[in-house]
Amino acid sequence: MTLEEPLSDEAVRYYEQFQGRRQARIEELKRALEQLQTKRRQTARQIAVNELPEKERFPRLRVERKQFVDTIKMIAYRAETALAETLREKMARRDDARALLRQIFDTEIDLVPDPEARTLTVYLHHLTQAAHDAAAGYLCEELTATETVFPGTELRMVYKMGSPEIP
């Protein structure tokens, strides 16, 4: 704050007192900040699990559960790798296969069961580029050729690009 015009002695005293109170508050806050920073530096960055209160401890997976979860992760990784290898057959840049898979996994689909034909058609919506659609279309053909039956049903899975035709 600056004073640009001549003021009375009373106004100057008020201004000086006001500025003094502000300066005192700033000093008080600086001291509090320094104390908090010192306290933070003294706080341990890591805590051992056995030092946590009982109610905040993480439940430990039993060995069998961990092996089961690891097995599922490995199966999923191998399935993703197989899909990526299939996509690489039709892609100009082979390194983009996993990125395209992530895009496919994030894309909406329509499921159309046909009990008479005993099929479950999976319509994958179009992707961001025509080249991606072509590679995904090839993947759809390859997956359809496996004649996989949807678990718990007798419906054979058919994969197609686009939207289902509405009668």
Image (cartoon, rainbow, N blue to C red):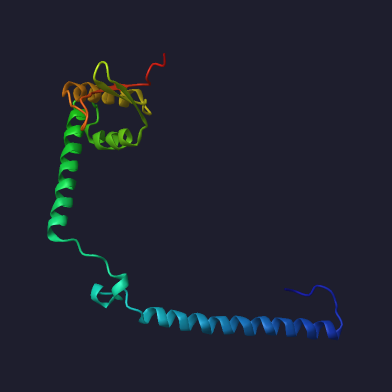
Question: Where does the image place residue 127, in percent across and percent down from the top left?
Answer: 36, 28
Q: Quadrant of residue 158?
A: top left
Q: Quadrant of residue 30?
A: bottom right
Q: Is residue 52 above or below residue 128?
A: below
Q: Is residue 41 left or right of residue 159?
A: right
Quarter that holds the C terminus: top left
**Residue 46 visible to an observer of this rendering:** no
Quarter that holds the N terminus: bottom right
Q: Which residue is located at x 38 percent, y 29 percent?
A: 128
Q: Is residue 32 left or right of residue 47?
A: right
Q: Is residue 6 left or right of residue 124?
A: right
Question: Where does the image place residue 137, in percent across and percent down from the top left?
Answer: 27, 22
Q: Which residue is located at x 41 percent, y 82 percent?
A: 39
**Residue 117 visible to an observer of this rendering:** yes
Q: Which residue is located at x 68 percent, y 84 percent?
A: 21
Q: Is residue 3 above or below residue 78?
A: below
